[in-house]
Image (cartoon, coloured by chain):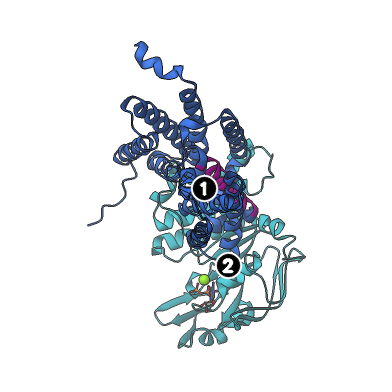
Amino acid sequence: MTNILDIFKYEFILRAIISSIFCGICCGIIGSWIVLLNIPFIGIAISHAAFAGSILGILLGINPLFTAAIFCLLTSFIIGPLTLKINLSPNLSMSIIFSVFLGLAFIFLSLIKNNKSEVFNFFWGNILTLSWEMVWIMFILTIILILFVIVYNRKIFIILFSNEIAQSVGIKYKAMFYFILGLCGIVVTLNLNTIGGLLIFSLIVTTPLSAYQLARSVREMYFLSSMFGIISCVLGLVVSYYLNLPSGSTIVLFSIFILVICRLLSFKQGEKVL
Amino acid sequence: MPSAIEIKGLTFNYNKKNLLKNINLNINEGEFYSIIGPNGAGKTTLLRLILGLIKVSKGTIKVFGQEVNKNNIFKIRRVIGYVPQYVSIDKKFPTTVKEVISIGRISLKNTFERWMKEDENIINYVMKMLNIENLSTRLIGELSGGELQKVLIALSLSKKPKILLLDEPTSNLDPKSQNEILDIIESIYSVKNITTIFVTHLLSHIPLSCRKIALLKEAEIFYDGFIEDSIGLLPKLYDYPVDINIIKGKIHIHVGKEKIHL
Ligand SMILES: Nc1ncnc2c1ncn2[C@@H]1O[C@H](COP(=O)(O)OP(=O)(O)OP(=O)(O)O)[C@@H](O)[C@H]1O
Ligand SMILES: [Mg+2]
């Protein structure tokens, strides 16, 4: 028995578990938005903005985290106007942003003379090497998100439900939509450094999608996807610790496992295609 | 009577094409107006302009004396109940009928305004009026087209609107549901006397309470006024032979297979 609890003796594990909880909640909330608005590409667009940003940072000799964050925030606040002003679907405008940044990234990369591997390290993130400051930042972000959801819960629901209806009933759709995208961007940006640009997908798409199978209201969806996020992070961490596997992979696999179960349990099976 | 909607010299262009051309229309408070025209005439476009969802190219639209523009569209949209012709919704969206109807109430609230017992009462009242209480806890994606149509009407009514814009609320419905919806619209009008604009391309769908119509074709309104005076112009609407007979003081109109009695 003592062996099993051993894991909590290490501060870095404790930190990872605490941040998993915040991460699960944040991603549960924005992931629900992302799934209901059908904009999964936001993750790709932002992680590549971070990629280009960090390379530029290394190139210029500034802290790559800083430039990456700036690129990410710019992106998340460009997507909204780009979508509404040019009248593109969000996924298309995000695909364009994605290719712009990928192009930029490789130009920057070609300009770096030595030590290119540093660039890729940044991209993965590692939940086991987080600092307490990072945990605090995530805590504050979680609180902000929860407050936003409490105050605007009903209006957010309308925007998620249908932009046509939101606009015609007189909701201030634009501002709210931009703000939602901006918050998604901030959460994704912060988590690039914690769980990494690729793993974030399992938390902003897979777990909310699991919740989507079972939820009967948006509120239930926030709750379920946060729970699923926390469960996959914590279980993934613990299992990776004992089996000595990379934590990111075990977290992803747990989230997929939950998705399969939810899909099987779903009452929203829909029509079978012949 | 004061005017609810006043449209003057309205033109709407898209890609240099006139989708609406020099529209003048005045709809008084408490009037029931039908806008009739073939597919592509510009009916939906006209409603979207009234709501300020798209911007006029020339001319003005006033709603209760206030011009529809950037500064007051939110105020104007609050007093209008709009039932769109189509809405695309996610069939699996996690929400119930009652929650969707509550959108009408939510749209009237300011940020920190609380949800009241009154809101709940209004929603229940509207559901009762449309006879959809039994659907209340159903998921929105599980409804039939007609049921969804009723839910959207309920949504627009839960705002307690001063103006009701109905864009072909009977399209996609079976004859029984069509009549049901038309009856509901009539009863809403007769009870509340809400200024109502009813868009359709079928003359036979004009509710009985409607006294005035506007005939819209190829971006222009070529007639607006009382129904009785429009009869001679109806053939022009469809480019299709229209038979008009007066039998025992009642007017019978045949447009193709359609039969209308006035
Ligand atoms: N978003 C748009 N962009 C460009 N043209 C449009 C758009 N929407 C409609 N139109 C064009 O405007 C004209 C009027 O369209 P509108 O939808 O107002 O017609 P309608 O009278 O409502 O027809 P229906 O009875 O088929 O609903 C049509 O010729 C249509 O092709
Ligand atoms: Mg139309």
Is residue A104 shown left or right of residue A209?
Answer: right
**Chain drawn cyan in the picture:** B
Q: Position of residue B61 (x, y in %)?
A: 71, 70
Q: Is residue A228 visible?
A: yes
Q: Is residue A244 magenta?
A: no
Q: Residue furthest top?
A: A2
B118 and A17: which is toward the camera: A17
- Badge number at residue A86: 2
Q: Quadrant of residue A148?
A: top right
* Amino acid type, callout 2: Ile
- Asked if residue B138 can be seen in this view, the reply is no
Chain identifier of the blue chain: A
Side of B85 where A255 appears, left or right: left
Q: Front-most of B123 and B8?
A: B8
Q: Is residue B136 left or right of residue A2?
A: right
Mark 2 C-beta to ligand 1 under 8 Å: no
Q: Is A262 on the left-hand or right-hand side of A183? A: left
Dot 1, crowdedness within 10 Å: few (<14), some or many (≥20)? many
- Seen from the viewer's position, the closer of residues B12 and B122 is B12
Please identify the quarter of the rendering in which residue B197 is found. bottom right
- Predominant secondary structure in magenta? helix
Please check the rendered image and state whether residue A179 is part of the magenta-colored stretch, yes or no.
Answer: yes
Q: Chain of mark 1?
A: B
Determine whether B33 is above or below B120 in the image: below
Question: Under tag 1, what secondary structure?
Answer: helix
Residue beneath label 1, please? B100
**For residue A143, above or below residue B167:** above
Magenta stretch bounds: A175-192
Expressed as whole percent of the image width and height from the top left, the position of residue A5 reads 39, 15
